[in-house]
Image: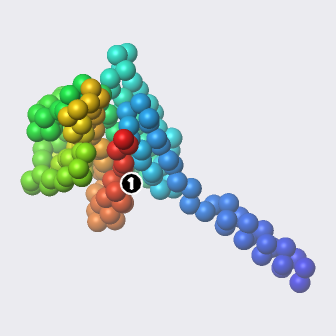
Protein backbone atom coordinates (compact mmCIF):
# COMPACT_ATOMS: atom_id res chain seq x y z
CA UNK A 1 0.00 0.00 0.00
CA UNK A 2 2.82 2.36 0.87
CA UNK A 3 4.49 1.67 -2.50
CA UNK A 4 1.26 2.47 -4.33
CA UNK A 5 0.96 5.78 -2.46
CA UNK A 6 4.58 6.68 -3.26
CA UNK A 7 4.01 5.79 -6.93
CA UNK A 8 0.90 8.01 -7.05
CA UNK A 9 2.81 10.91 -5.51
CA UNK A 10 5.64 10.50 -8.02
CA UNK A 11 3.19 10.36 -10.93
CA UNK A 12 1.42 13.50 -9.67
CA UNK A 13 4.66 15.48 -9.36
CA UNK A 14 5.84 14.24 -12.76
CA UNK A 15 2.61 15.45 -14.37
CA UNK A 16 2.93 18.83 -12.64
CA UNK A 17 6.51 19.23 -13.82
CA UNK A 18 5.41 18.52 -17.41
CA UNK A 19 2.59 21.07 -17.24
CA UNK A 20 2.45 23.49 -20.12
CA UNK A 21 5.18 26.10 -20.04
CA UNK A 22 4.68 29.17 -22.18
CA UNK A 23 7.49 30.99 -23.93
CA UNK A 24 7.08 34.71 -23.32
CA UNK A 25 9.08 37.15 -25.44
CA UNK A 26 9.14 40.90 -24.81
CA UNK A 27 11.27 43.18 -26.96
CA UNK A 28 11.26 46.68 -25.48
CA UNK A 29 13.52 48.05 -28.24
CA UNK A 30 11.05 47.08 -30.95
CA UNK A 31 7.96 47.50 -28.75
CA UNK A 32 6.25 44.11 -28.99
CA UNK A 33 5.57 41.00 -26.97
CA UNK A 34 4.31 37.54 -27.80
CA UNK A 35 3.43 34.48 -25.78
CA UNK A 36 3.82 31.04 -27.35
CA UNK A 37 2.31 27.85 -25.95
CA UNK A 38 4.39 24.93 -24.76
CA UNK A 39 6.53 23.25 -27.38
CA UNK A 40 8.13 26.25 -29.05
CA UNK A 41 11.90 26.60 -28.76
CA UNK A 42 13.73 29.80 -27.84
CA UNK A 43 14.12 31.90 -30.97
CA UNK A 44 17.08 32.52 -33.20
CA UNK A 45 17.45 36.32 -33.14
CA UNK A 46 19.23 38.46 -35.74
CA UNK A 47 19.47 42.25 -35.85
CA UNK A 48 20.91 44.60 -38.45
CA UNK A 49 24.04 46.59 -37.66
CA UNK A 50 21.97 49.78 -37.86
CA UNK A 51 19.65 48.39 -35.14
CA UNK A 52 16.58 49.16 -37.25
CA UNK A 53 15.38 45.62 -38.09
CA UNK A 54 15.26 42.48 -35.98
CA UNK A 55 14.08 38.96 -36.79
CA UNK A 56 12.96 36.17 -34.49
CA UNK A 57 12.67 32.62 -35.83
CA UNK A 58 10.87 30.02 -33.72
CA UNK A 59 10.91 26.27 -34.31
CA UNK A 60 8.67 23.75 -32.62
CA UNK A 61 10.50 21.04 -30.69
CA UNK A 62 8.03 18.27 -31.60
CA UNK A 63 6.58 19.43 -34.92
CA UNK A 64 9.08 20.23 -37.66
CA UNK A 65 6.24 21.13 -40.06
CA UNK A 66 5.61 24.53 -38.43
CA UNK A 67 7.69 27.65 -37.90
CA UNK A 68 7.13 31.25 -36.85
CA UNK A 69 9.03 34.31 -38.07
CA UNK A 70 8.71 37.81 -36.66
CA UNK A 71 10.27 40.75 -38.48
CA UNK A 72 10.18 44.08 -36.65
CA UNK A 73 11.20 47.40 -38.21
CA UNK A 74 11.94 50.75 -36.51
CA UNK A 75 10.94 53.84 -38.49
CA UNK A 76 10.89 57.56 -37.95
CA UNK A 77 7.43 58.06 -39.47
CA UNK A 78 4.23 56.14 -40.03
CA UNK A 79 4.82 53.53 -42.75
CA UNK A 80 2.30 53.12 -45.57
CA UNK A 81 0.85 49.67 -44.83
CA UNK A 82 0.16 48.65 -48.43
CA UNK A 83 3.66 49.65 -49.52
CA UNK A 84 5.15 47.75 -46.55
CA UNK A 85 3.23 44.61 -47.54
CA UNK A 86 4.15 44.98 -51.21
CA UNK A 87 7.87 45.29 -50.44
CA UNK A 88 7.85 42.22 -48.17
CA UNK A 89 5.81 40.12 -50.60
CA UNK A 90 8.26 40.91 -53.41
CA UNK A 91 11.41 40.37 -51.30
CA UNK A 92 13.07 37.33 -52.89
CA UNK A 93 14.94 36.42 -49.70
CA UNK A 94 11.62 35.88 -47.88
CA UNK A 95 10.30 33.58 -50.61
CA UNK A 96 6.64 34.17 -49.73
CA UNK A 97 4.25 31.97 -51.76
CA UNK A 98 1.42 33.54 -53.83
CA UNK A 99 -1.46 35.05 -51.87
CA UNK A 100 -4.60 32.90 -51.69
CA UNK A 101 -7.64 35.16 -51.36
CA UNK A 102 -7.97 38.69 -50.08
CA UNK A 103 -6.48 40.57 -47.16
CA UNK A 104 -8.49 40.98 -44.00
CA UNK A 105 -7.91 44.40 -42.43
CA UNK A 106 -8.00 45.28 -38.74
CA UNK A 107 -7.61 48.49 -36.77
CA UNK A 108 -6.73 48.87 -33.11
CA UNK A 109 -6.36 52.61 -32.60
CA UNK A 110 -2.59 53.12 -32.35
CA UNK A 111 -1.92 50.39 -34.91
CA UNK A 112 -3.59 48.69 -37.80
CA UNK A 113 -2.83 45.80 -40.07
CA UNK A 114 -3.80 43.14 -42.54
CA UNK A 115 -3.69 39.37 -42.61
CA UNK A 116 -3.64 37.01 -45.58
CA UNK A 117 -3.14 33.37 -46.45
CA UNK A 118 -0.40 32.38 -48.90
CA UNK A 119 0.01 28.98 -50.59
CA UNK A 120 2.15 27.03 -52.99
CA UNK A 121 2.75 23.31 -53.46
CA UNK A 122 5.05 23.06 -50.43
CA UNK A 123 4.03 25.74 -47.92
CA UNK A 124 0.92 27.37 -46.54
CA UNK A 125 1.55 30.60 -44.66
CA UNK A 126 -0.65 32.82 -42.55
CA UNK A 127 0.94 36.28 -42.43
CA UNK A 128 -0.06 39.23 -40.27
CA UNK A 129 1.24 42.72 -41.08
CA UNK A 130 1.08 45.50 -38.49
CA UNK A 131 2.14 49.13 -38.39
CA UNK A 132 1.96 51.72 -35.63
CA UNK A 133 0.35 55.10 -36.32
CA UNK A 134 2.05 57.51 -33.93
CA UNK A 135 1.82 60.65 -36.05
CA UNK A 136 3.32 62.88 -33.34
CA UNK A 137 6.27 60.58 -32.67
CA UNK A 138 9.67 59.98 -34.27
CA UNK A 139 9.35 56.28 -33.36
CA UNK A 140 7.06 54.05 -35.36
CA UNK A 141 7.20 50.34 -36.00
CA UNK A 142 6.07 47.83 -38.60
CA UNK A 143 5.88 44.07 -38.09
CA UNK A 144 5.42 40.90 -40.04
CA UNK A 145 4.19 37.91 -38.02
CA UNK A 146 4.63 34.93 -40.33
CA UNK A 147 3.32 31.43 -39.62
CA UNK A 148 4.68 28.74 -41.94
CA UNK A 149 3.47 25.16 -42.31
CA UNK A 150 4.11 22.24 -44.63
CA UNK A 151 1.11 20.43 -43.13
CA UNK A 152 -1.54 23.16 -42.83
CA UNK A 153 -4.92 22.05 -41.47
CA UNK A 154 -7.66 23.44 -39.23
CA UNK A 155 -5.78 22.48 -36.05
CA UNK A 156 -2.63 24.28 -37.21
CA UNK A 157 -4.67 27.29 -38.35
CA UNK A 158 -6.37 27.49 -34.95
CA UNK A 159 -3.01 27.33 -33.15
CA UNK A 160 -1.55 30.05 -35.39
CA UNK A 161 -4.55 32.34 -34.83
CA UNK A 162 -4.38 31.83 -31.05
CA UNK A 163 -0.70 32.77 -31.08
CA UNK A 164 -1.44 35.83 -33.22
CA UNK A 165 -3.97 36.96 -30.61
CA UNK A 166 -1.08 36.99 -28.11
CA UNK A 167 1.05 39.31 -30.25
CA UNK A 168 0.95 42.71 -28.57
CA UNK A 169 2.36 46.05 -29.63
CA UNK A 170 3.73 47.91 -26.63
CA UNK A 171 3.41 51.66 -26.10
Q: Locate residue 56 relative to residue 96 in the image: left or right.
A: right
- Regarding residue 117, the answer to whether it shows in the image is no
- Where residue 19 appears, as percent x and y from the top left, is 61, 62
- Where residue 5 appears, as percent x and y from the top left, is 84, 78
Q: Locate residue 129 relative to residue 44 in the image: left or right.
A: left
Q: In the depicted view, which residue is nearer to us: 60 or 137?
A: 137
Q: Locate residue 126 relative to residue 10 in the image: left or right.
A: left
**Image quadrant containing the N terminus:** bottom right
The residue shown at (73%, 66%) is: 13
- Where residue 50 appears, as percent x and y from the top left, is 34, 16
Query: Dot 1 corresponds to which residue?
Result: 166
The residue shown at (31%, 58%) is: 161
**From what the image shows, is residue 8 above or below residue 71?**
below
The residue shown at (71%, 64%) is: 14
The residue shown at (78%, 68%) is: 10
**From what the image shows, is residue 133 above or below residue 11?**
above
Amino acid sequence: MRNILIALIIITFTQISFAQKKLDITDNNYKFSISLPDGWLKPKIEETNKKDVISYTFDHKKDSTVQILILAFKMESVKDLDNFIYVLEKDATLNIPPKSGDYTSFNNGDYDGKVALYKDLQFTELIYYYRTKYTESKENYAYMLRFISTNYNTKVEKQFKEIAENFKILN
